[in-house]
Amino acid sequence: MGPFSAPPPLNVRQPNVARVYDRLLGGKDNFQADRDAADQLQKLLPDVAKAARENRYFLERVVRYLVGQAGIRQIIDIGTGLPTQDNVHEVAQRIAPETRVVYVDNDPMVVRHGLALLATNGNVAMVEADLRAPREITTHPDTRRLIDFSGPVAVLMLASLHFVTDAEHPQAIVSEWRDTMAPGSYLAISHITADEVEPATAKAAQAVYADASAPAVPRALAEVESFFDGFALVPPGVVNINSWPVPVPAYAAEDRALLYGGVGRR
């Protein structure tokens, strides 16, 4: 999308997954349809807004680990969602200002907000592309400008892969990314689960997303672990996000898991 191209019209009548997530986080970049969907989810799962905040904190801990301990200096954040506090580049560049970050989302509203946020940061780019098309992301001029795939890179798929249905072959998408990444690279995933949710409640929650811009597919622990085939999992592996890398005092690690998360090294 060029700097002077007209933005596509917004569909404000259909819930949008990025805007629903924004609503759950307490943001203001959402419309009535998004608020209604978020309210339905909270009636079904009273702790869903808490889980959304916990996912943001998981993201922060993951980025601090990747940049501070693993020495990563280039990151691709796929399905970034609407900007909020402590975005990936902000967390990373507080530790290492030279860190380069490419944000990726297929939502034009997200892209516009991202471009406005990043206008003054030469080490960060916003790419409009789809998680389901890895090559579209890796060959994008802005990705090529900032990311050197001959060296280690971190790929983040936080709260995004569950919007890829089984028919869209999420395992193949992750495998394509794995084969693109140099040794020493990292993959981070957080993913919704219904392992600890009553089946009827899980089905009703899925129905809310069925009318949204993308359906949500909760997956079991073993399914989320399988996305890390070819990666060495960083301890403690794939766990309740509140237990990575250790139980987080601010949240009860024994709370039921609504999201699993993990980090793997190529």
Image: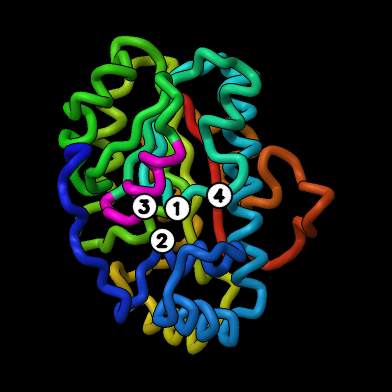
Residue type indicated by callout 4? Thr
User: Residue 123: image x %, image y %?
Assistant: 42, 20
Mark 3 or 2, nearer chain start = 2
Query: Distance from label 1 to label 3 (Cα)?
Result: 5 Å
Query: Do callouts 3 and 2 mark residues in contact (Cβ within 8 Å)?
Result: yes
| 10 Å crowding of disc 3: few (<14), some (14-19), many (20+) | many
Q: Quadrant of residue 179?
A: top left
Mark 4 or 2, nearer chain start = 2
Identify whether 82 is placed above or below 103: below
The label shown at residue 82 is 1
* Left-right relation of 233 to 111: right
Dominant secondary structure (helix, strand or loop) of the stretch shown in magenta: helix
Query: Do callouts 1 and 2 mark residues in contact (Cβ within 8 Å)?
Result: yes
| 10 Å crowding of disc 2: few (<14), some (14-19), many (20+) | many
Query: Do callouts 1 and 4 mark residues in contact (Cβ within 8 Å)?
Result: yes
Query: Do callouts 1 and 3 mark residues in contact (Cβ within 8 Å)?
Result: yes
Mark 1 or 3, nearer chain start = 1
Residue type indicated by callout 1? Leu
